[in-house]
Image (cartoon, rainbow, N blue to C red):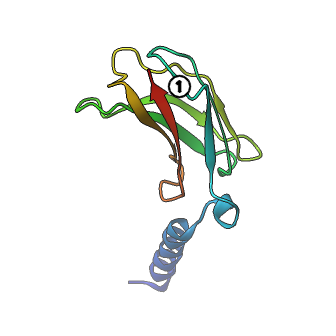
Amino acid sequence: MTVRRALAAVASAAIVLSAFAATPANAEGPPPTVALAPRSGRAGRQVTITGSGFTPGDLLRVRYVTGLASPERVTLCKVLAGPGGTLACKPRIPIDDAGPIGRHHVTVVDVTHPLAAHAVAIFRLR
């Protein structure tokens, strides 16, 4: 192996390692939060979902946990976190896949940084 190839291999390895070592911008801040309004309702109800504490510009996936064998989760929205690490979307609770009456988790996961903290809120299906 030539010196040039060896240096190129070391540089490539350093880039890959730095990508794995990268942490989201909010790693030092408070954990992400999410809120629903209203927090209860029937299937098909439109809800306002807001959140904060996410990494600005990251892709966020908001999912509704159905309590069914299939599908277990339904994506409500995918949005980019705002400049202040905020989240806002206005989806509807699923109609066909809402699941049983009772409590359902609504989760927010940072798709860009999958190991980052996520946030959970509760929606009570009536």
The residue at the point 70 percent across, 62 percent down is 29
| Of residues 100 and 91, the one drawn nearer to the viewer in this rendering | 100
Identify the image quadrant of residue 39: top right
Residue at screen point 22% across, 33% down: 69
Horizontal and vertical percent for residue 85? 71, 47
Most extreme residue toward the right, as rendered? 84
- Where the N terminus falls, by quadrant? bottom left
Amino acid bearing label 1 = Ser
- Left or right position of 48 against 12: right
Q: Where is residue 79 drawn, in percent x and y? A: 60, 34
Relative to 123, residue 86 above or below = below
Classed neighbour count for the residue bearing mark 1: other residues with Cα under 10 Å, few (<14), some (14–19), many (≥20): some
x, y percentage for residue 64? 44, 32
Residue 87 versus residue 24: which sits nearer the camera? 87
List the single residue furthest toward the left: 69
Total marks shown come to 1
Quadrant in the rendering for residue 46: top right
Please determine whether, in this image, residue 86 is positioned above or below residue 18. above
Image position of 32 (left or right of 42): right
* Residue where numbered disc 1 is placed: 40
Give SS at disc 1.
strand
Q: Is residue 13 above or below residue 80?
A: below
Q: Quadrant of the C terminus?
A: top left
Quick one: 111 or 122, which is closer to the camera?
A: 122
**Horizontal side of residue 96 vs 16, given as left or right:** left
Q: Position of residue 53 (x, y in %)?
A: 68, 51
* Residue drawn at the location 49% of the way across and 68% of the way down: 16
- With 88 as the anchor, is 71 left or right in this view? left
